[in-house]
Amino acid sequence: MDRVVVFMDYQNVHGWARRQFLPYGADPAEGHVSPLKVGELLVGRRRRPSELQEVRVYRGRPNPERQSGAARANDRQSADWERSSKVRVVRRNLMYPADYPQSRQSRRAST
């Protein structure tokens, strides 16, 4: 039996889920997916017998001093996902431009 590890760039997965399944302009809080369920779905559709070993979720973490609500939501969501021993969340602190929030589009995760 194959052992499978799924690597997920959460921002891209969330963005594509929103574009595919929600109307334009929907609340940004909508369209979240369960990394564990996505991993199980992918493994379940393989032709070869497989077992989900782990889902590694890579995502940015908002700065609590700049986006306290988003940081709290991110913390809660990550903790919820990691209740499963098969999910590991790897977060990087987001970097903000000096004129944030005027230039929100240029936020990126630090490396």
Image: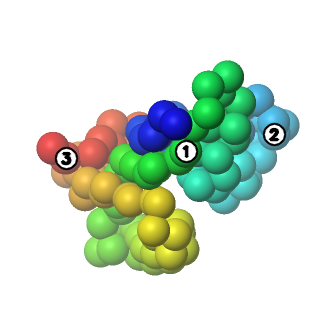
Q: Quadrant of the C terminus?
A: top left
- Residue 68 visible to the viewer: yes
Q: Which mark is residue 9?
A: none
Where residue 95 appears, x then y in whole percent? 23, 51
Identify which amino acid the numbered label 3 is placed on: Ser
Residue at 52%, 36% in the rendered image: 1
The answer to whether residue 17 shows anywhere in this view is: no
Circle 1 packing at 10 Å, graded few (<14), some (14-19), many (20+), is some
Q: Which residue is mark 3?
A: 110
Q: Residue furthest top?
A: 47
| Alpha carbon distance from label 2 to label 3 | 29 Å
Residue 51, which numbered label? 1
Q: Amino acid at mark 1?
A: Glu
* Residue at horizontal 55 percent and vertical 45 percent from the top: 51
| Residue situated furthest left in the rendering | 111
Please tell me which residue lies in front, 59 or 30: 59
Indicate the position of residue 71 as horizontal and vertical percent values: 41, 70
State which tag comes first along the sequence, 2 or 3: 2
Q: In this view of the protein, which residue sits in the foreground, 93 or 38?
A: 38
Q: Residues within 10 Å of mark 2 (few under 14, many from 20)?
A: few
